[in-house]
Amino acid sequence: MASHDSSSTVLSLSSPVQQGRLLVVDDEASVRDALCTILRERGYETRGCMSGAAALEVLGQEEFDVMLCDLMMGGMDGIALLRAVQGCDPDLVSILMTGQSSIDSAIEALRVGAFDYVLKPLKMSVLLPVLTRAMEMRRLRTENVHLREAMGMYELSMTVAFSLDAETIVRKMAETVLHSCRADEVGVVLPTAEGEDWRVVMAVGKDREQLVGQATPLEQTVLGWVVRHREPLLLHGAMQLGRYTPVRPRPEISTALAVPLLAGGRVVGVVTANRTQQQRAFTLGDQKAVGILASIAASALTNRQLYHELDLRVQERTAMLTETNRKLQGEIVERQRVEETLRRTEEYFRSLTENASDLIAVAEVGGVLRYVSPSVTQALGYQPEQLVGANGSMLIHPEDLPRVREVGGRLLSTPGASVRLECRAQSADGSFRTLEVVGCNLLHTPPVAGIVLNARDITERKEVERLKEDMVAVVSHELRTPLTSLRGFAELLLNRTFPPEKQREFLTIIHSEAVRLTNLINDFLDIQRLQAGRYVYQFAAVDLRTLLRDAVAVFTSGERTHPVRLEAPDSLPLVYADASSLRQVLTNLLSNAVKFSPHGGKVTVGARPDSTDVRVWVADRGLGIPQEALPKLFDKFYRVENHETRNIGGTGLGLAIVKEIIDAHKGALWVESESGKGSTFFFTLPVCPCALTAC
Ligand code: ADP
């Protein structure tokens, strides 16, 4: 270490106003001391140095505002000292003191960086104003330094604000610390993510990069002290004192600063700064500046950490949402597929229901119809919308209603149960159709939640069944009776010998019974043929009068008990008819008139034109027909059963045949009758169109 004149160091502690710190360098002791004394009296703190080397050593350790330096010195001259000072304290303001003879050198010194020069011998009147200006310059330079520091902080803040990259933040902080403190090296140590190790994450300065990544222990180290105490540590020449164990001994470090990066009272890192090229210690101002930079960086790093965690959470949440979305998409596709299948199934069953010949309906508990399939139009002649909302019981035949209610009650009491019943329902034209109804209680089965009714029109089937039953009854009675009679008389004739007149009597009975059988069988065959549509009508213009006359003639020939008369105008219009079937109509009506007039009586056949028809009637004065029998008179196999008719044979088919034939002619058929007084059967036939035009 170079020696310096320590005796000339004077601290102006008594000075009321601290003008500034002056370093006076002159190898002439008298000049140097005098200057120090005078300037101290002017309020400056002064220190004197006898050589350039001594001055450099002092500048390495202390800070001065202005250096007053002799140009011509032994050893290192003023110019050389100025150059050297630029290296260790570029903000120091230097004033050269020079003799007249070296004025050129003084100008050279200005070029090198001196602020001004004063001529020797020194005059205070000259020096003091220069000194005042030099102090002003120093103040400006210091302000400039503060400005630079502020700029560094500003830049760091901007970096922090716009960068989420930890390395950028740490690097910017390290560089700013390096410049603002005039450090030679800066390092940043951060704990690892697990928090177990502390590692160098940034190292700037000559050959410092290689330290990055190295672990730094906390035990007995400056780092450990700072982390534990959460305070900055400023060291100057104390590294070798044994208080701390240097991780990597560095004797070249003259001064060091370690500042914690504090965020929320927690140490999240440590920034260190070293000076190796200059002896001057870091000041408290340096420490404060680094502290500000460290706190900016610390909060940025913590925010960054928070941001990173937030980002991770956002990423996790995004991944979850993406997955949920993917599943949702899958579910939507699946649901669409299911809906499509359901739609098709629904369409399928709907079309089955709507096109089914059976009538399908859904009813509420009280009988109100909620749905009626379109087949109701075909079955009963209603439009579905006429019945939806109406009570189904209004269609039921009053006679069937109690039974329907009773069965319905049973059905309602058992969820899921089904019942079958037959009932008559009134169709739109007022007639009743027999329905076979299957009801199913689906009140508790969503989505039906109702009574499902499946009805089938069995009117025809019932009719056939009734016909069969009637036929069996007729066959058993009507066929058996003549056959028994035939067989009995035939056996008598075969087994015994009778006189010729008795034989004739028996044979007459056999004949009439055979005729009865023939008629019966013919009636069967006729009605069956007519109803099956197997009979082919030959419609043509028929001369009705001739036809009536011939029919009457049949009933007046031979031994007839009843007078049969024709009452008709001489000329009747031609009718449009099938002559053969018309003959059968007249025969059936005339034979009935005779048959049911057991006590005789006139039978009349009449006819008269009536608008576009011709009305025909057959009247008798026989037994007549009870009122209650009239509605059923034209039904197949219907016969009035009472003591008067008991002995009158018949099949109950004659009038049914008449009705079939008149219907085929699009005519009307009716009867007027009174018990005990006789009956008149009327029918109409359409006048032949040719006859109408002729009129
Ligand atoms: P059938 O004469 O074979 O009994 P129909 O079908 O011709 O059968 O007649 C049905 C029923 O109508 C008869 O059984 C009878 O009771 C009644 N009937 C028909 N015509 C007359 C009539 N002119 N007078 C009284 N009753 C009649």
Image (spheres, grey):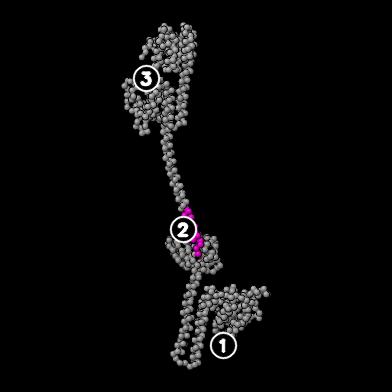
| Residue 324 place in picture, x, y as percent | 43, 45
**Which amino acid type corresponds to the residue marked 2 in the rendered image?**
Ala
Q: Position of residue 651 (x, y in %)?
A: 51, 79
- Which label lies toward us, 2 or 3? 3
Residue pointed to by mark 2: 449
The magenta segment is 339-357
Q: What's the distance in space between the residues labelled 3 and 1, CA to CA? A: 169 Å
Which three-letter amino acid code belongs to the residue tagged 3? Ser
Q: Residue furthest left?
A: 242
Specify whether residue 353 is painted magenta. yes
3 vs 1, front mark: 3
Q: How many labels were placed on the picture?
A: 3
Q: Which residue is mark 3?
A: 254
- Figure quadrant, ligand 1: bottom right
Residue behind mark 1: 559
Q: Residue at x 46, y 84 (%)?
A: 484
